[in-house]
Image (cartoon, rainbow, N blue to C red):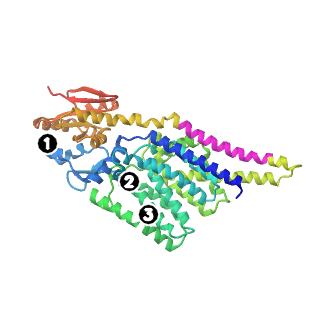
Amino acid sequence: MSPMAGGKKIIAAFFIAAVLIYYGWLLGTNLCTVAGGSDSSGYLNFARRLRNGPLVEPVKTVEALGLSEEFRPLFQPIGFTRGSRSQTIAPAYPPGLPLHMAALAAILGWKIGPFLVSPLAALAGLFLIYGLARQLGLSRPLSLVGGCVLAAFPAYLFIAVQPLSDVLASFWGMFAVLAALLSRKRAGWAWAAGAAFGLGVLVRPSNMLILFPLLWALPSKPKIFLKFFFGGFFFGFVQFFFNRVLYGSVFTTGYREEAAGAFAIRNFPTLFLFFGRWLSRMLTPLVPLAWPALIADRNVPRRDRLLLVFWFAPFLIFYGLYQPFESWTFVRFFLPALPALILSALLLLRDGTNYALEKIRAARFRDSKTREILAWIPRVMAGLLVVLVVHAEIGQVKKLKLLDVNEFESVYEQSCLAVKGRLPETSILVSGQLSGALTFYTHFPICLWDSLRPQSFFLLQQKAALRGWGLYALLFPSEEKEFQNFAPGPWEKIESYRFVSLWQYKPK
């Protein structure tokens, strides 16, 4: 190696290290360390029960107030579902992320440990997509471009600063596919592919769809598939164990109520356009269109083309049939399959550039200098396309204010802690969106206002009054008007915590 080449490598290494340090700093300084809405509070409540128990918890308020079993759903905060025994509730979310959270909490404490899972997975994911790109034959510079596009993708960055499962599911999905590709050279990697696949399914059940690209990534040898199977067998057992303990059957999940009737063929046209529009805004239309176009690129081995096609297609079909969405944030469901789009675009960019260079080299020019000048055109065009994509991503990050998430989410913690210090222990809190956070930060019984009906609320307030319990409500502005249709009566707003209000039921 010449001194000049060695110097370039050192400069490149320092530059890459600086970018990674900056990205880590960006995630760390914008990290959301709050148990907020249904997802984040649901995972954190589950994680804490893994450490402190119980996983399946009796609804004590029903018994304390002398209410019947039909009142149990009223005291089931968001993020929970009915448990395996009568009059019990259990966490509704998959155990994968809570297990990671509990492990980091044991090392770093509950104040910061659980909240580092997503940013650490996001950073590690950049190395994985680089490794995937290299295994698919891309050069080091283009592989680094893949990492940059993934890092700047708005939904990736948005989830990376929150205690949510999507980035972690993406990490284990990429790990599984990379290990499967490596098993083409060393069979032992099939064990790791199976384990990563099993962990990914524990984190997000829809990661089961990663099995489709794995079938093309793994060598077609019975011994390899056996190693893959036994690599993931333990984590399948863990999933069945949690299903049995939490819900009473190894084949029952916490999504049983949510999934019922959520899928329909009629949803596909609407959702296809919805996701296509947002992916095009975030990545420009170039990247999503490169994915189907790759199937015609004969310079990419057929097995690798099918790998990338069957990596994204199952997710598109699965979530294309799911219930319609209104918010762009649901693009996060595609994070485990996003590398397929990025890698497809990079492979087409490489082969398109090489094709143009070959045509220029084959052309006849009077002098070689003209050929050298023209040869820069496809390289410059390729660079401009990369800049265009990253610029679109950064533009969406700024437009959607993705790094301001902690500013909004902090109201969950602030309002819950304020209520905890203000209300007597014999209080029942009527709530909705804040019910998961209230469960995490306080010990008050929580009653869901949208599960109430005027008749059931009348009976509830009578029973509470007889036993000296007070009724309060902690609500977002969007809930204030509607909640009194479900829980009518003399409610009085007594305090506000930013845009969250505390109400007291004051019978005459």
The 10 Å Cα crowd at callout 3, few under 14, some 14 to 19, many 20 or more, is many
**Sooner in the amino-acid sequence: mark 1 or mark 2:** 1
Asked if residue 395 is among those painted magenta in the image, a careful observer would answer yes
Q: Are marks 3 and 2 in contact (CB under 8 Å)?
A: no
Asked if residue 150 is among those painted magenta in the image, a careful observer would answer no
Looking at this view, is 318 or 375 the one in front? 375
**Sooner in the amino-acid sequence: mark 3 or mark 2:** 2
Q: Secondary structure at mark 2?
A: helix
Looking at this view, is 352 or 316 the one in front? 352
Q: Nearer the viewer, mark 3 or mark 2?
A: 2
Q: Which residue is mark 3?
A: 195
Q: Which residue is mark 1?
A: 65
Q: Residue at 48%, 54% (x, y): give it.
A: 171
Q: Secondary structure at mark 1?
A: loop
Q: Nearer the viewer, mark 1 or mark 2?
A: 2
For marks 1 and 2, give the CA distance.
37 Å
Residue 18: which quarter of the image?
top right
The 10 Å Cα crowd at callout 1, few under 14, some 14 to 19, many 20 or more, is some
Which residue, as the protein is rendered here, is positioned at the far right?
366
The 10 Å Cα crowd at callout 2, few under 14, some 14 to 19, many 20 or more, is some
Q: Which residue is mark 2?
A: 100
Which residue, as the protein is rendered here, is positioned at the far front?
3
Q: Nearer the viewer, mark 1 or mark 3?
A: 3
